[in-house]
Amino acid sequence: MLNSKEDLNREQALMLLESFAKRWIAHDGLWFQSIEKERGMDEAIHHDVEAWRKFTVVEAKRIKEFLQLPDNGGLDALERALNFRLYAFVNQQKIERPNSQTLNFYMTACRVQSARQRQQLNDFPCKNVGEVEYSLFASTIDSRITTRCLTCPPDAHPSEFFCGWEFTLEQI
């Protein structure tokens, strides 16, 4: 039995990070479902967008500080930061760098979408949320980065990933 966080070895600490991420996703889903049940999907998505508008900036700033990323760290800083997001501990993602100015990010396994598939439900339509979330996360890491959605539910997507995002480093 563990008595405190100081008693954790590396493996236990990583397991705890995963547990924290799962609990956070569960809470996020439960508050969303509460609004959806009382007010409908459109209002729930509206509030989800507004919550992400603030949370993604807080998350990016804290990751940037934790990793000591420079203000203009470019796509290298963004790539590193994406690997430290809360959901990165429970989802699977893939990053490609087709050229020096572009980073493509793909969510290859998404806990939310996988749960919906198991329940034989349609994909959760997260594109509106994602557009706010990813663009603000990226621009908080480096204000020169612009974001474009490649595909995200409710858009059709290939079986290899649920959503894809293109980040471009703009030269100002």
Image: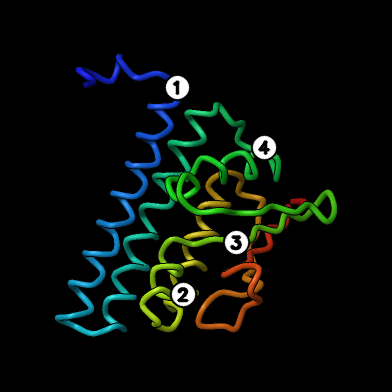
Q: Is mark 4 on a helix, strand or loop?
A: loop
Q: What element carries label 3?
A: strand
| Label 3, label 1: how far apart the Cα atoms are | 26 Å
Q: Is mark 1 on a helix, strand or loop?
A: helix
Amino acid found under the numbered disc labelled 4: Gly
SS at mark 2? Answer: helix
Which residue is the site of mark 1?
10
The amino acid marked with disc number 1 is Arg
User: In percent of the image, x 46 and y 39: which residue is there?
Assistant: 61
Q: Name the residue under label 2.
A: 128
Q: Are marks 4 and 2 in contact (CB under 8 Å)?
A: no
From mark 3 to mark 2, how far is it between C-alphas?
19 Å
Amino acid type at mark 2: Asn
Other residues around mark 1 within 10 Å, as few (<14) / some (14–19) / many (≥20) = few
Task: Give the mark nearest the N terminus, 3 or 2.
Answer: 3
Give the residue drawn at x 43%, y 36%.
62
User: Between disc 2 and disc 1, whose residue precedes?
Assistant: 1
Dot in front, 3 or 4: 3
Specify which label sits upstream in the sequence, 3 or 1: 1
Q: Are marks 2 and 1 in contact (CB under 8 Å)?
A: no
Mark 4, residue position: 73
Which dot marks residue 108? 3
Q: Give the left or right position of residue 162, taking residue 105 as reference.
A: left
Quarter of the figure that contains the N terminus: top left
Q: Distance between the residues labelled 3 and 4?
A: 25 Å
Name the kind of residue labelled 3 in the image.
Answer: Thr
**Label 2 to label 1: alpha-carbon separation:** 37 Å
Residue 7 in the image, given as x and y percentages of width and height: 30, 15
Q: How is the image coloured?
A: rainbow
Packing grade of label 2 (10 A; few <14, some 14-19, many >=20) is some
